[in-house]
Image: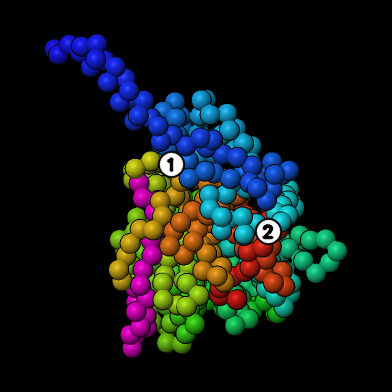
């Protein structure tokens, strides 16, 4: 063992002090534009160098903890971080403040049933309404939020024929395109007659309520449970096919590996475009059509999960995939394909579920207990903490400025300055 001399001890201590000299202080503070608004807090230098006493809870034992997130990190030696624990809007970059505008606000508009998630919201301008789904065993209709009155109004919404367990949706050329998970027959909420259904891509005419099946198999093999979709400028439908329909018991055990497909309604041809992501989930395309984004929620682990176990049928694997990937979109005579896969963002909690692209190219993801806003290159700009698990989001209103938030809790709305969907 080597003994340190008096001089060596002094040098060692000074060296340790110097090693800690880069600690960010304070980690958080009131944003200059919101000095009287404790609901908005700014993070200094992304809190990249915290005091060594910091501690963030880790999700273990196969279950995800809602406290496993940046805002719930404990930093006892920096009291400023309490501002983060209590804020709704957490700003990491000046562009985040510009998104919020002068008076950002999160309102919980509707208290909703807590036995189901809320998914697949689509804003229909001609109706000035949002149609969304409750993909859950035993719920066989959708719901609609009317925005054309003095206050939003929530009603049940049943199509012809009815559709069971919509998980993702997009508006294109006046029609709503749905990614539908359920693969079981179900009783019609209109008259009780049995409706047969397979997972696939469906089209809704919102003016009549009529639904058409566009795709429900891959050369005779049923899809697992299409999760989300995007319609490109050519009208081709890109969709992710993951295992979550089985997870919530609305379809049978998966027989296809999780993958992303491109479907051309004009010919009926469906082509696989990506099959390396563990559980492809949210999907979107840049406004210029040159970049495709697909999120991975491979932290959900279906291996050896018993069919008679509690729902959802997966465990949480902290070492599973939860990155957001970007791809180059390349044109070909058979339809565009994607190449040059690269991760641009690692979810800071759980994974990115519902996913949207704003008109300026910013990326918005339903992520754990809130909404994350990224630049087109994956830089964290802003985090909205909702206090409940968020599964999907949707811009709505004449300018597509209000952001509606759906998940396992209330239906909420953010008013701010970021403008709408690139696809609308």
The number of callouts visible is: 2
Q: Position of residue 64 (x, y in %)?
A: 47, 38
| Residue 330 is a magenta residue | yes
> Horizontal placement of 193 versus 320: left or right?
right
Q: How is the image coloured?
A: rainbow
Which quarter of the figure has residue 219?
bottom left
Classify 10 Å Cα crowding around label 2: few (below 14), some (14-19), many (20 and above). Answer: some
- Answer whether residue 255 is visible to the viewer in this image: no
Residue that protrudes farthest toward the right in the picture: 150
| Residue 183 is a magenta residue | no
Say which residue label 1 marks.
48
Image: magenta residue range: 320-338
Marks 1/2: CA–CA distance: 26 Å
Camera-nearest residue between 413 and 308: 413
Say which residue label 2 marks.
101
The residue under the point 23% across, 17% down is: 8
The residue under the point 62% across, 59% down is: 98
The N terminus, quarter of image: top left
Q: Earlier in the sequence, mark 1 or mark 2?
A: 1
**Callout 1 touching callout 2 (CB < 8 Å):** no
Camera-nearest residue between 23 and 228: 23
């Amino acid at each position: 063992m080597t003994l340190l001399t008096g001089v060596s001890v002094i040098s060692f201590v000074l060296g340790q002090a110097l090693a800690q000299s880069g600690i960010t202080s304070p980690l958080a503070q009131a944003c200059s534009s919101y000095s009287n608004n404790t609901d908005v807090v700014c993070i200094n230098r992304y809190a990249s160098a915290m005091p060594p006493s910091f501690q963030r809870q880790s999700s273990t034992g196969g279950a995800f903890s809602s406290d496993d997130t940046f805002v719930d990190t404990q930093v006892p030696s920096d009291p400023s971080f309490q501002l983060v624990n209590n804020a709704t809007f957490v700003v990491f970059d000046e562009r985040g403040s510009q998104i919020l505008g002068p008076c950002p606000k999160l309102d919980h508009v509707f208290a909703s049933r807590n036995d189901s998630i809320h998914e697949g919201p689509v804003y229909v301008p001609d109706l000035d309404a949002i149609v969304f789904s409750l993909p859950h065993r035993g719920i066989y209709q959708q719901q609609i939020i009317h925005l054309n009155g003095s206050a939003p109004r929530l009603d049940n919404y049943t199509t012809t024929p009815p559709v069971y367990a919509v998980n993702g949706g997009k508006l294109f050329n006046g029609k709503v395109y749905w990614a539908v998970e359920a693969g079981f027959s179900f009783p019609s909420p209109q008259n009780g007659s049995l409706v047969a259904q397979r997972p696939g891509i469906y089209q809704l005419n919102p003016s009549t309520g009529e639904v058409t099946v566009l795709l429900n198999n891959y050369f005779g093999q049923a899809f697992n449970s299409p999760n989300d979709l995007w319609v490109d400028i050519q009208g081709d439908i890109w969709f992710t096919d993951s295992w979550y329909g089985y997870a919530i018991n609305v379809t049978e055990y998966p027989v296809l590996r999780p993958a992303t497909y491109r479907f051309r309604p004009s010919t009926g041809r469906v082509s696989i475009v990506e099959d390396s992501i563990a559980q492809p989930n949210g999907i979107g395309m840049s406004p210029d059509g040159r970049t495709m984004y697909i999120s991975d929620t491979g932290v959900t682990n279906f291996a050896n999960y018993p069919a008679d176990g509690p729902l959802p049928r997966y465990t949480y694997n902290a070492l599973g995939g939860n990155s957001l990937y970007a791809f180059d979109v390349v044109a070909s005579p058979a339809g565009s394909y994607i190449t040059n896969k690269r991760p641009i963002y690692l979810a800071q909690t759980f994974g990115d579920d519902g996913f949207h692209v704003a008109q300026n190219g910013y990326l918005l993801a339903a992520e754990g207990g809130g909404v994350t806003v990224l630049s087109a290159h994956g830089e964290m700009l802003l985090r909205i903490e909702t206090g409940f698990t968020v599964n999907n989001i949707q811009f709505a209103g004449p300018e597509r400025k209000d952001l509606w938030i759906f998940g396992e809790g209330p239906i909420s709305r953010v008013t701010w300055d970021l403008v709408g969907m690139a696809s609308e």
